[in-house]
Amino acid sequence: MDTVFIRQLSVATVIGCYDWERTIKQTVVLDLDMHWDIRAASAGDDLQYALDYAKVSERLISFIEGSEFQLIETMAEQCCAIVLAEFNVPWLRLSLNKPGAVSAANTVGLVIERGEKFSEGGG
């Protein structure tokens, strides 16, 4: 299976458990790897068969900007659910970073994988 990716999607949102975090917007940064068979799109040079990464990005930005999660774990799970359900992506890996959350680190975060992995030629 081929992979369509989005790197360093930066979104400002309310995120965090502490009182001070509930009063400001912080930036979260996402990386996505999404399995998608590109053969139909490439054969006809046709966007209708492609995974539209612009639409995926717009949808996630809109969702995250309107959210007020306490945990990045919850945000990550819900972002994956959106991509799997609304864009018919069979599998994805999502990395969610919260830069500046720990003063001694450039960023902290998590990586999750959801959906069904396909072997080469499968799917």
Image: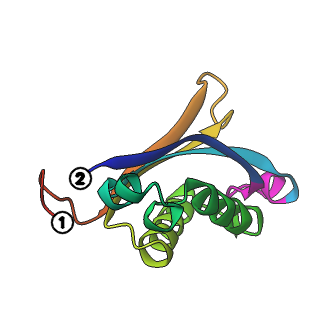
Q: Position of residue 97 (x, y in %)?
A: 57, 41
In the rendered image, which quarter is residue 114 located in?
Answer: bottom left
Q: In this rendering, would 99 be left or right of 39? A: right
Q: Position of residue 15 (x, y in %)?
A: 70, 56
Q: Amino acid at mark 1?
A: Gly
Label drawn at residue 53: none
* Residue extent of the magenta highlight: 13-22
Q: In this rendering, would 52 be left or right of 9? A: left
Coloring scheme of the render?
A: rainbow
Sequence-first disc among 1 and 2: 2
Q: Is residue 15 magenta?
A: yes
Q: Amino acid at mark 2?
A: Met
Residue identifier under label 2: 1
Q: Quadrant of the C terminus?
A: bottom left
Residue closer to the observer: 106 or 55: 55
Label 1 crowd bin: few (<14), some (14–19), many (20+), radius 10 Å? few
Q: Are marks 1 and 2 in contact (CB under 8 Å)?
A: yes
Q: Residue at x 38, y 67 (%)?
A: 89
